[in-house]
Image (cartoon, helix red, strand yellow):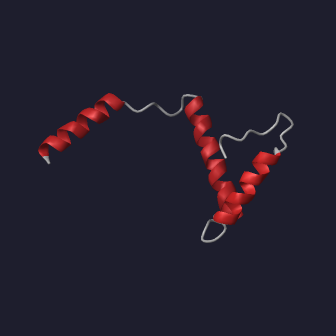
Amino acid sequence: MASCSISASGSWSVKDNKAFEKALAVYDKDTPAVEEVKRHYELLVQDVKHIESGRVPFPNYKKLLQSQLIWRKKG
């Protein structure tokens, strides 16, 4: 559904709605309740805001990769 876009007015296109209906048909059982999904979404939005505001430092991938290589050599 990520490729489907919501119009500027905020309403869903026919394509968006159809993709959502298909997702509901496929993933309707053994999934979180609506309130759980909303809460998870809200937490993700807060995470993005913290990242974008600079409150969350970017990981040092170079150090991470080096430590993984050292661990693999030992193992």
Q: How many marks?
A: 0
Instruction: Residue 25: give x, y in percent of width and height.
Output: 70, 65
Q: Is residue 10 above or below residue 29?
A: above
For the point 77% across and 46% down, the residue is 15
For the point 65% across and 64% down, the residue is 26
For the point 75% across and 58% down, the residue is 21
For the point 14% across and 41% down, the residue is 73
Q: Is residue 21 left or right of residue 75?
A: right
Q: Is residue 4 left or right of residue 9?
A: left
Which quadrant of the structure image shows residue 64?
top left
Q: Is residue 74 above or below residue 40?
A: above
Instruction: Residue 4: give x, y in percent of width and height.
Output: 71, 41
Which quadrant of the structure image shows residue 53?
top right
* Near-viewer residue (13 or 75): 13
Which quadrant of the structure image shows residue 32?
bottom right
Q: Is residue 29 left or right of residue 61?
A: right
Instruction: Residue 72: give x, y in percent of width and height.
Output: 18, 43
Q: Residue lying at the far left in this picture: please name it.
A: 74
Q: Is residue 16 left or right of residue 1?
A: right
Q: Is residue 41 above or below residue 68?
A: below
* Near-viewer residue (74 or 4): 4
Instruction: Residue 49: give x, y in percent of width and height.
Output: 62, 35
